[in-house]
Each structure stands twice: as structure tokens, then as C-alpha cells.
Amino acid sequence: MKNIILIISLSISNIILSQNITISGKIISSSEEELAFVNIFDKTSKKGTSTNMDGIFSFNLPKGNTILKLSAIGYKQ
């Protein structure tokens, strides 16, 4: 089964009282192919998003612990 490699960039807002962080990154396969339409779900906040055609995603989450779950058709969880 194919494996997914996750590259995440955490961007913390410069606003002092901000209660959110922005999670963004690019999902690639173990053979370094960009993966489109991968679902990314935060188990803690129950928020999610999907990658675009280039494997790129970005979304805002509340500060705190984050557990991301990735899923894509044809890939092992």
C-alpha cells in the first residue's frame, strides 16, 4: 500500500490575542508526487479541509493540541 508523506508548516498569527493558528502545507507521496484531494481532519476541533490539485492545503485551528488525520482514496491510513 502507498504511504503519504506530510509536510506541514505552522504559522502562528502575529496578533497577540489570537486564539487560532494557521496550518498549511503540501501533501506528497513517498515517491514525491503531489497528492490532490487528500482529506485532512483535526480530531480535536472537528475541522477539516482538502488539498488542491497541487497537494497544497491551509486552514485555521484553535490553539492547543492538534491531532491530524489524513485520508485519500487508494492510500493506507
Image (cartoon, grey):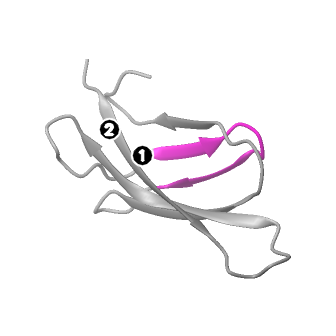
In the rendered image, the quadrant that contains the C terminus is top left
Which residue is the extreme one toward the left? 31
Badge 1 or badge 2: first in the primary sequence: 2
Calculate the distance from the C-alpha at mark 1 to the C-alpha at mark 2. Answer: 11 Å
Residue at position x 82%, y 67% from top? 19
The amino acid type of the residue labelled 1 equals Val
- Please give the residue where the numbered disc 2 appears in the rendered image: 5
Residue furthest to the bottom in view is 15
Point out residue 73 in the picture as x, y percentages from the top left corner: 37, 33
The quarter in which the N terminus is drawn is top left
Is the residue 53 above or below the residue 33 in the image?
A: below
Q: Amino acid at mark 2?
A: Ile
The residue positioned farthest toward the top in the image shown: 1
> What residue is pinned by disc 1?
38
Q: Is residue 39 above or below residue 54?
A: above
Residue appearing at x 56%, y 55% in the figure: 49
